[in-house]
Image: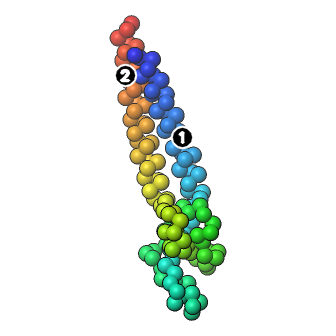
Amino acid sequence: MKRAFLILAVLSVLGFVATFPFQSVYAGKAKMIQRIERSASADMFGDEGTPIGQPTMLIIEDPKAFIGGPDEKGVYKVDEGYLKANSIYPRQLKTIDFVASMARIGFGIAAVVLGLLSWQLKAKSK
């Protein structure tokens, strides 16, 4: 039993460590993005369309969703109609950060508790 707790504690430590590259990979893909609702009248008059909300750090991996390059502030524009048509839901960077931090807390607590249980069982067996 103590061996099982020790193995689970080690796996928890590995899970804790794995959250750092997980978060880093997604942070590297994030861009400041403004979602744009395009309409027929906007296309006819050469307008970009109606902005939806404020620019946010989002992760969108489909390059066809983007409308041109970044503006002078470094904000990319994304066609909301394309996202809906292709069932693409952009992930927010703050959500990824939250999930990674909660996973770190969970893995850390699990590693400590399982390590203490393994150590306690080892001390009892002697």
**Residue 75, can we see it?**
no
Q: Identify the image's colour scheme: rainbow, by chain, secondary structure or one colour.
A: rainbow
Residue type for callout 1: Ala
State the residue position of label 2.
117
Label disc, if present, on residue 91 of the rendered structure: none
The image quadrant of residue 64 is bottom right
The quarter of the picture where the N terminus appears is top left
Indicate the secondary structure of the residue bearing disc 1.
helix
Label disc, if present, on residue 18 of the rendered structure: 1
Q: Residue at x 50, y 37 (%)?
A: 15
Q: Residue at x 57, y 46 (%)?
A: 21
> In the rendered view, would you say 31 is above or below 105?
below
Q: Position of residue 34 (x, y in %)?
A: 51, 74
The quarter of the picture where the C terminus appears is top left
Q: Position of residue 77 (x, y in %)?
A: 56, 75
Indicate the secondary structure of the residue bearing disc 2.
helix
Mark before the other along the chain sequence, 2 or 1: 1
Q: CA distance from mark 2 to mark 1?
A: 23 Å
Q: Position of residue 80 (x, y in %)?
A: 50, 73
Residue type for callout 2: Leu
